[in-house]
Image (cartoon, rainbow, N blue to C red):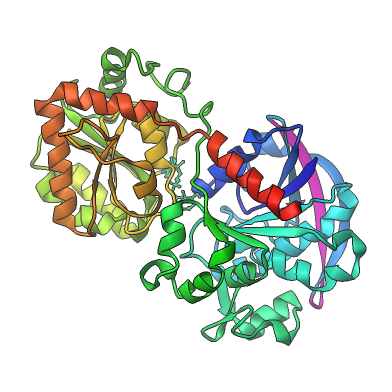
Amino acid sequence: MKKILFVASEAVPFIKTGGLADVVGSLPKYFDKEQYDIRVMIPKYLCIKQEWRDKMNYVTHFYMNLAWRSQYVGVLEMEYEGIKFYFIDNEYYFAGPKPYGNIYEDIEKFAFFSKAAISALPSLNFRPDIIHCHDWQTGLVPVFLNDSFQNNPFFQGIKTVMTIHNLKFQGIWDVKTVKDITGLNASYFTPDKLEAYGDANYLKGGIVYADAVTTVSETYAEEIKMPYYGEHLDGLLRARSNSLRGIVNGIDYNEYNPETDKFLAHNYNAVNFRKEKVKNKTALQEELGLTVDPKKMMIGIVSRLTDQKGFDLIAYVMDELCQDEIQIVVLGTGEERYENMFRHFAWKYQGKVSANIFYSEAMSHKIYGSCDAFLMPSLFEPCGLSQLMSLRYGTVPIVRETGGLKDTVQPYNEYESTGTGFSFTNYNAHEMMNTVRYAERIYYDRKREWNKIVDRAMAADFSWDNSAKKYAEMYDWLAG
Ligand code: ADP
Ligand code: GLC
């Protein structure tokens, strides 16, 4: 039996700001329980809903040194859908309305969390063979583990994996402060270790010290070795390329299932979607105050509203696009200029554009389960889960060919009758618009063809089974 501990800053159903939470919360369920004991550790944020907090059980507490500070570490646990979750408690660090806030606070918060995660293990009666770290918030785990913990035989031989969900965020702060926060020796802050371009970099530490490095699609694993996508760490990633691999994300096929989804007005499946799915569209049109018309092509967007997701392309041609026979439904929060852009167009094109500038799981499911197409023209995309959810719900993705979007959406080919979506190559607003318009033509003029695209989209398999096997292979290889 191999023991694996996931350490991460978010996990569904407890706390989620993006796809990271979906992955950390769902992937552990898809391993063979006879062979792999996978547990998950996240912070016990004060902003986790009370109903979850009430179900957590106290395990232990102790005090831990973090440089010159001595800090309280509480550990709670809870079993959820067969997986054991641990929660690290410290109300000084994990208060606040959101998991992340100011970077200078987060830098100390996640140094604390990373060290606490390791320190808690002996008292949990759980010695993992592998600690699997996710994103910069846990980048210091392999570093700390390499440091003073090596004096204790309990920790010797534990292997680490660092998974990069988004290279854009690295946890960067000045060396002096990070030294003071972490208590790590000056020898760690050199360009071959934690230092990068004069600052301390948590993710870099993780990449340097982890035994294996993964990211969330094969294309992104290649892209980040090049300067354009490498976020200044492409050199290091090239140097570590023998230990770097891409494993594409899956989604929880039980959670995201049009046949049983409790958020949908009408459930449907790959056989009856032609008749049933459109009922969700008219229900959503009514709910959002859009013109009720089952025939109108509805395009959905569910996203963090940031540059990463290609919103400057959308902003650039939105007026033009709104001249077409389409409806656009947006759900998202993020940069104010994009929030206001969508509010503006919802006001300008009433009945046609709906701007939902908030976070809602229910609304996200309704959009996946109602729209005809889903737009995701990302500048870069490590994997992307929204397009996988769209495929599952027969909502045809229109994407830019980058990262995981390239690996998961097969472009429609009208001559061969293949493909599960539409895609374009260059980061160019008119190229995007032409692709949307091409999709419109198929939707309106060749409905049978369109429905076949939906058939293929719904038949595509992005459940976790395949990818979980690849992680399992990697664990076997690491832990022998
Ligand atoms: P990222 O992690 O970069 O934000 P992903 O596509 O991997 O992108 O994952 C995004 C996840 O967050 C999906 O589960 C998506 O449905 C969800 N999501 C994004 N914005 C919202 C929102 N405003 N309300 C509800 N869910 C959202
Ligand atoms: C990040 C990426 C996204 C990926 C998610 C889960 O948030 O932006 O592309 O799907 O992590 O791995």
Query: What percent of the width, then of the height, locates residue 237?
Result: 52, 70
Name the residue at 43% across, 69% down: 230
Location of residue 478 (image quadrant): bottom right
- Is residue 405 shown in magenta? no
Magenta stretch: dominant SS? strand
Camera-nearest residue between 454 and 21:
454
Magenta residue span: 67-80
Quarter containing the N terminus? top right
Quadrant of residue 23 within the rendered picture: top right
Rendered position, 391 above or below 203: above
Q: Is residue 12 visible?
A: no
Left or right of 358, for residue 215: right
Q: State the image quarter where residue 206 is shown.
A: bottom right
**Residue 219: image x %, image y %?**
41, 55
Horizontal side of 426 relative to 441 (left or right) equals right
Up-down relation of residue 436 to residue 113 (above or below): above
At horizontal 30% and vertical 52% (from top left) the residue drawn is 401
Is any part of residue 429 visible from this angle? Answer: yes
Seen in the picture, residue 236 relative to 418 is either above or below; the reply is below
Q: In the image, 166: left or right of 68?
A: left
Q: Position of residue 407 (x, y in %)?
A: 38, 47
Residue drawn 72% across and 81% down? 180
